[in-house]
Amino acid sequence: MIMSKTIFAALALAGVLLTSAGPAAAQENASVEPVLNGWSFGGLFGTYDQAQLQRGFQVFREVCSNCHGAHLLAFRNLAEEGGPGYSEAQVKALAATYTIADPSATGGERPGVAADHWPSPFETEQDARDANGGALPPDFSVIAKARGITKPFPFWLFNYFTAYQEGGPDYIHNLLINYRDQPPEGVTVPDGKFYNAFFPGHAISMPPPLSDGLVTYEDPNVPQTVDQYATDVAAFLMWVADPHLVARKELGFKVLIFLVLFSGLMYLTKRKLWSTVPH
Amino acid sequence: MAHSAERYEPKNPALKWFNDRLPLLSYSKAHFVDFPTPKNLNYWWTFGAILTLCLGIQIVTGVILAMHYTPQVDLAFDSVEHIKRDVNWGRIIQGVHSVGASAFFFAVYVHIFRGLYYGSYKAPREVLWMLGVIIFLLMMATAFMGYVLPWGQMSFWGATVITNIFSAIPLVGTPILEFLRGGFAVDNATLNRFFSLHYLLPFVIAAVVVLHVWALHIPGNSNPTGVEVKDGRDTVPFTPYATIKDLFGISVFMIPFAWFVFFAPDILGHPDNYILANPVATPEHIVPEWYLLPFYAMLRAIDFNFLFINSKLGGVIVMFGSILILFFVPWLDTSKVRSGAFRPMFKPFFWLFILNFLTLVYLGAQSPATRFGILSASDFAKLCTAYYFLYFLVILPVLGRLEVPRPLPASISESVLAKSH
């Protein structure tokens, strides 16, 4: 056990040595401090909030999907367990309102079915760029995993123990709430770009997509603000990126319980076996 | 030593007939049951079994993943997502495989550092140690190529940076580079050969593991005192004593493993690898997986020319040298005493080596310009690289001559008895 003490001492020393350097590194990219949400799907027992996913889907469908695709998202996913919880009939009806390009159909097009994937808003990458001033709106299939929040040195270590995996939705939320009408004094934004206090480099090609009251929620008790829309759509995009999160965490909890009990039994077995051997 | 117990002969006539022609049963009994194991092994010795399990997990999950994966640049990324979304149990199998790589490396580092602390590489176990270094090298190659397969941004740019290393070799560098990539740039041909080799190398590792275990079973295990086994009182049969202890070690090891698989499967990777590989958009920081970071830090630390060696070649020499030097450790360490537990001067240098290694892990992920007080990350990495080599080239050879070790116990059983009082 002397050894583990030494390891801890060494780690602590490394920590002290390196933290002293943390803040200097963080200041390089003077961005606003990200606000971290307490997501319902964070932590050991995290689970998606169905109502929030439905609202987020509404924001995605009415706003984001005009420019952004999500080619890994199938309509049928919307009715699958652990998701926004639409019924199969609702999903069928929704899919049918979309036109799907299908070379094997008469006229090359047909109404969507539940098995279809989310149609891309643009036919080719070039079309997408042409419609967006040269910038390519990224696909949203796994965007919530392709973005993250970096924390300075000692703090990211805690992520391993808290299993913080919500950097993606936190990034999306912060990006969407940090548009500014006017850049701060002395900062010029190139033509066709917009000022975002959170975005690295601050000049972003995407115009501010949200505004208060833009999307009408069914539930009158939910505020119709940019912050609420941003939170909801970030949660929805996390589900799109990780549709089986809930099932995974539920199984994980059972696996952990089993392993802890099994380790305990193995320890007792080992102790009994070795009790007659001096070692 | 492996034959101290009597040769096992099966009673069943059919088994006896088979065993007389191929003594698989006698052999298994001798090596997996009767094999005399020092009774004072501590839990650091369970990592051999843990590593065997890790290799098994990677092979089994990998074979299943290969049934659903498509090694083609336009389809690879989506096929990995398909596994996670639509394949039965796919998300768990893929999670186990990707987290498993990290677990494998964590365990191998513990195993290597245990060997370095207890002097397990000393005579007569030099070949055992060197086979271990070969396994470590093969693991790094396998893991690197595996990380390329999902064809995300880090996959692509990692492959570009690492294959580019070979172009530093004078004269033959560029032909080697093009041979590795299968073209002038990392592309479909690269992905295909990496997939092929990623499937092949684990079986090569398994073969070298067999040799590693064979080489272990000639002299038998070393142990925390470093005093060789003298007689039967020093040992217990491998089964059930070591097997049950190893199983306990394995089940404890599985707890953090499962934690990462089920609650943080992506935390050990980089978000950029969820962006499809794009040859015209370079990520801001190209960072390899954590387990390759110390070597990456040493590669980047050499940013100056030295005589006729330019900085690029220098970095490559230092990086490969940092692993090749391990082959020579049995002869660089001049101490007559095997176990570090009896070497008072050795201990602080060893723990500093561990701290130094962890610092290199950290520095490998930092931009070289990051400042730490008066030092940049690059300066800091130079110091750490220097200590890494000094440890092997100066400290180990010199300590063995200067140091007065603590008195060794006469035998393992004596040390065990002394401890119980």
Image (cartoon, rainbow, N blue to C red):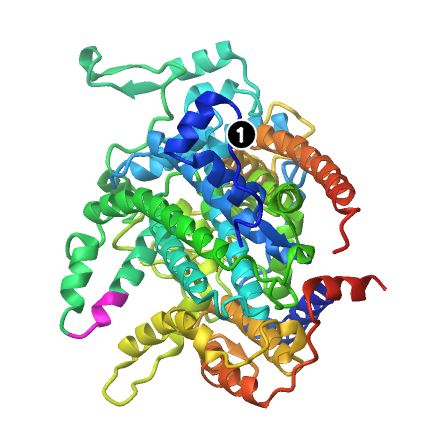
- Residue located 67% across and 34% down the image: A253
Q: Read off the magenta span.
A: B165-170
Nearer to the camera, B365 or B109: B109
Q: How many marks?
A: 1
What chain letter is assigned to the residue under label 1? A
The amino acid at mark 1 is His
Percent from the top left, x then y, of residue B401?
Answer: 55, 88
- Residue located 31% across and 18% down the image: A99
From the image, give the main secondary structure of the stretch colored magenta: helix
**In which image quadrant can residue B66 be found?**
top left
Q: Is residue B167 magenta?
A: yes
Q: From the viewer's perspective, is residue B252 above or below residue A255?
A: below
**In which image quadrant can residue B157 be found?**
bottom left
A1 on left or right of B34: right
Circle 1 sits on which residue?
Answer: A244
Quarter of the picture containing the N terminus of chain A is bottom right
B291 on left or right of A167: left
Q: Residues within 10 Å of mark 1 (few under 14, many from 20)?
A: some
Q: Residue furthest right?
A: B421
Q: Which secondary structure, mark 1?
A: loop
Percent from the top left, x then y, of residue B154?
Answer: 37, 53
Q: From the viewer's perspective, is residue B180 above or below residue A111?
A: below
Q: Is residue A51 magenta?
A: no
Percent from the top left, x then y, of residue A275?
Answer: 79, 46
- Residue located 37% across and 55% down the image: A193
Q: From the viewer's perspective, is residue B102 above or below residue A99?
A: below
Quarter of the picture containing the C terminus of chain A is bottom right
Percent from the top left, x then y, of residue B212?
Answer: 43, 54
Nearer to the camera, A90 or B44: B44
Residue A180 visible in image: no
Residue B420 visible in image: yes
Nearer to the camera, B95 or B218: B218
